[in-house]
Amino acid sequence: MALSSLEMEALQLSLQVALLAIGVSLPIGIAMAWVLVRKTFPGRILLDSIVHLPLIVPPVVVGYLLLVIMGRRGLIGAWLWETFQISIAFSWQGAAAAAGVMAFPLLVRSIRQELEAVDRKLEQAACTLGARPFVVFVTVTLPLIVPGILTGTILAFARCLGEFGATITFVSNIPGETRTLPLALYTAVQSPGGEGAALRLMMISLALALGALITSEYLTRRTRK
């Protein structure tokens, strides 16, 4: 089916938001998973809990917290605005931040599970041959956790595409700026006579989510082989 201009706009914005969110979250997620698996320090359990908190609390809570921190009058947002004239709230970059925060636990969890399964003897063997820790990670550990990285990336990408609560709380529902597919669907449902548009947007969202899950499973199996 041919997409209307509004549907295409929402789809392109959703993909743009998801790609930025994953691009920023992926290196941080790999580092966080490594810290949680390989390091022991006071507060590790607390850090682990904070990382996974977006899976438990309502998305609206996350969105409001982002608004308090990153809003133009927020703890960090006020400094960004006064110093660099940068405002993340009520922008598509803010939508990416909200989606990234909500998807981050899925990314870390997938990478962490793969990292826990790595045989430490392989890393120790590389160290005895004189390889530095960073070289060991890049040449030994990283290739072994690629399936987890792929799975986490695709699942987090799909989660970003479906993010609603934190997005609408942090960046509102601005046409052409923050109205992603879920927000466009919400708008259609709230509009008189918008059932047809809502149905089409629902089908697009389901197709994207299903495609992401199938791709994740295919790439994971192929990588493991």
Image (cartoon, rainbow, N blue to C red):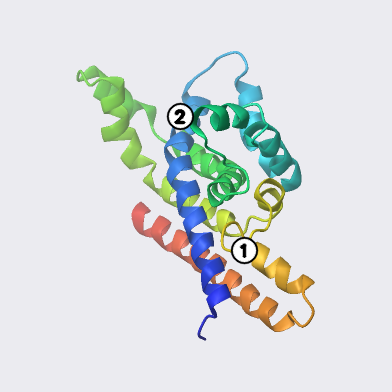
Position of residue 99 measured from the top left corner of the image (x, y, whole percent): 59, 49
Callout 2: 10 Å neighbours few (<14), some, many (20+)? some
Residue in the image at 66% along x and 31% along y = 69
Residue in the image at 32% along x and 30% along y = 137
Q: SS at mark 1? A: loop
Residue in the image at 78% along x and 71% along y = 190
- Count the labels in the image: 2
Task: Report the amino acid beneath label 2.
Answer: Trp
Tell me if residue 53 can be seen. Answer: no
44 vs 186: above or below? above
Task: Out of 37 and 190, give the one closest to the viewer.
Answer: 190
State which quarter of the image contains the C terminus: bottom left
Q: Is residue 110 left or right of residue 195?
A: left
Q: SS at mark 2? A: helix
Task: Out of 56 and 87, give the one closest to the viewer.
Answer: 87
Q: Which residue is mark 1?
A: 175
Residue in the image at 68% along x and 32% along y = 73
Q: Which residue is mark 2?
A: 34
Task: Report the amino acid beneath label 1.
Answer: Pro
Position of residue 183 measured from the top left corner of the image (x, y, whole percent): 67, 62
Instruction: Give the Cα distance between marks 1 and 2.
Output: 39 Å
